[in-house]
Image (cartoon, grey):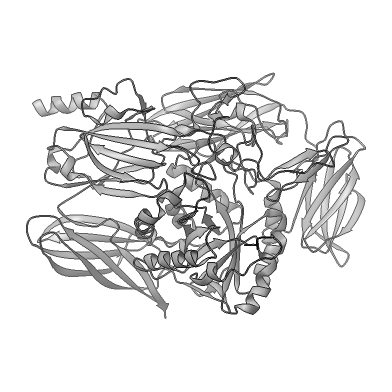
Amino acid sequence: MKLCKLLLVLLLSNVQIVNAGARKELFDRGWRFDKGSHADAVTTTFDDSSWRLVDLPHDWSIEPLKDQIEDETIGPFSKKSPGGPATGQTLGGEGWYRKSFVIAPGDKGKRHELYFEGVYNQSEVWINGRKANSNVYGYSTFRFDITPYCKTAGQKNVVVVKVINEGKNSRWYSGSGIYRHVWLIQTSPVYIDDWGTYIKTNNITEGKADISLTTKVINTSKKKAELRVQVDLLSPAGIIVAKVANNVMLSINDSLEVPFKLTVNKPALWSTDSPNLYTSRISLWKGKNKIDEQTRPLGIRTIAFSVEKGFELNGIPVKLRGGCVHHDNGLLGAMAFDRAEERKITILKKNGFNAVRGSHNPMSESFLAACDRLGMLVVDEAFDQWNSKKNKDDYHQYFKDWSAKDIKSLILRDRNHPSVIMWSIGNEIPERNNDKGRETAGYLRSEIRKYDDSRPVTAGVNKQWDKEHKNMLPLDNAFYNLDVAGYNYMWRFYEVEHEKFPNRIMYGSESVATEASQNWDKVEKLPYVIGDFVWTAQDYLGESGIGNSLEVAPEENVHQFMGWPWFNGWCGDIDILGVKKPQSYYRDVLWRIRNISMATEIPAAEGKIRRVSFWGWADEALSWTYPGMESKMIKVNVYTRYPQVRLYLNDSLIAEGTTNDMYKVSFNIPYQKGQLKAIGVTNGHEFDSVALSTVGQVSAVRLVADKTMMAANGQDLSFVLVELVDKDGNVVYDSKRKIKISSEGNGGRIIASGNASPNDMQSFNSLNPNLYNGRGMVILRSSYEPGEISLKVECESLKPCVIKISTQ
């Protein structure tokens, strides 16, 4: 009875009671947080009751700043940002987290471990007033044993995390704090190492898959252990298709890697079109007692790379329709919710991508798990710098002492993901082409090979010029230790490089949208060029305005970065709301997903012209609605592989054109309301068409939720798209309307809102934002208990729109 009362009191005091018998438990709920310096917060007696209660994932850099200073601060953005436009005009600083937990009496004698999936940036962890761990790389996952620091089961423990994100340490928006999941892992003293299992598909022949599996067993007990290790392989339908077991003996404080061979008949292969996942269930037995068990997803597949056939998945050549992606989730900042990561991959798949490059750091576990489930290939990248700096406070300070540890955690964590096809050791490394860079690449390659020999090593390599910046230097050192060569923005050199290095496998590790056709033509034409990765697949925070398209005077030029109030890169195929941008419709034509697409260029003001930055795209719209522009000239761009295009306005033929070698034909025509239609023509015959129609006046607000029922776990999300529509349901491109967002109910809460504009700071995570091109978004987070949330959006002169989301 006394124990029950104690547990009740602890529960009411925001103390997590760890589930008895749980091996791995999410440790995200009920943290106390405060931004600032709190050196005395490491003590168990520190009073944190005035600190804010937060649930992870958490990113304080995306939150509105407390002191809003006119002409200096807007929401989370500040002109005092050390990173400025590069980091999206946001601030880091110092933050502290505290959480109390109790180990259930039933788990007495177990081993306890904390697992942080990502903390930006430098972090230190104390357990019950004793320093237990530190980490310096904000994207690196880290685990450590907390058993020696914990109190007896049934007593309160306090974990404290200090996070520092200061100085100019990033080239993009990083976020700050514990922005990914934290887990508590509890095992017996003899256990299966969480990162100690390594699964490989060795070959698939005659309808059989030969699989090797090695798992690491560790004995931290004070006795020898006689054990049986068993592996059950379950099909995607949950049926056991293979079973093996080995008996082992472990000495005190010893570990052992136990190898297994498995054969699967008629395997359901993992591919981008059919991402079939098996499950390996590994159990550890002491006599008749099962003392530990782990499950790991397994995709049975083979990969191969060659200059003759390019990249092959299961023996079938596959061209990589790739996109680079940063780690942030737009309006959510750096917070890596499982649901947000899955949505990101779902959107990219829907828009034709079959591969992503994590730029330029390890991505979250949930990101890779989504790639496994949905069938997205991954270039898994480790670093953006080695020993030489890109910014004075970046990772170069720690590379010498920490890189081996960080590359190990990446490979051990990710090596069983079927989606991962290459390891990238870096991006545009300053010392890439000197002897030191060659030596460092060799060192990283050898570190990878300690833990995985089944995937090639690559990197994103950019040009290097002589001192006069006239001649491009050979990149021999940069490519020397790479199995597959990543070329950033160098499609013009593929054939020349192939003549010099006929055994070199290449791909476009970065490219720009305006050169999409040149890049993709090379991929289709040259077997040794295995794919192309556009910069970027989706808009992201930071590198503000590199994709700008500006209205300027004829004598003006545009710049790589844009200053205040720009905070968004604006170079993606998809915007930060997940809406497809015009350049993506062009890419659909290149990738043969659609046969014809069309967009119109928004006219510049009189006396002005539009200039597009290197990473940008013309200011196009999928619109034929230009009120007040009657009889004035509008530029129309049609993208297609058809040799000719006919343009019709209100069913009258008004123009014909020949498609150029970039699969584009442009027309300048006088604007008139109605329907504009483009038809692809071959040998005088009309085939596929695309049309744009003039939309009516705004008549309503429409709310479209991608999920109307959330799980009552405090982690689920619903992304609600807000649209202005006419009476026929067409979206009206209106960027002047302001909306008011509110909610009622206990099913969840609003955690983000805004629009896709790259420079509308006032609307970012505001409950009274402007719409941009007729759209905005509200993101809801589920509660921990069943309920319902009613979301209401109001817009002047229009009827309020309400949508209800259930949490169960």
Q: Position of residue 161 (x, y in %)?
A: 31, 36
Tell me if 320 is positioned left or right of 37 in this view.
Answer: right
Residue plotted at (34% across, 37% down): 28
Quadrant of the rendered image containing residue 602? top right
Q: With 404 as the anchor, is 438 left or right in this view?
A: right
**Residue in front for this viewpoint, 79 or 300:** 79
Q: Is residue 273 left or right of residue 587?
A: left
Picture quadrant where residue 792 is located: top right
User: Considering depth in this image, is 236 or 174 the residue closer to the camera?
Assistant: 174
Quarter of the image for the C terminus: give it. Answer: top left
Where residue 548 sits: x, y (%)?
Answer: 70, 43
Q: Quadrant of residue 196?
A: bottom left
Task: Give percent across and percent down for residue 317.
Answer: 56, 72
Q: From the viewer's perspective, is residue 191 above or below residue 76?
A: below
Q: Nearer the viewer, residue 189 or 17?
A: 189
Q: Residue at x 31, y 40 (%)?
A: 124
Kindly identify the residue that appears in the image at 66 percent across and 59 percent down: 593
- Which residue of the protein is positioned furthest toward the front in this rendering? 467
589 to 600, vertically: above or below: below
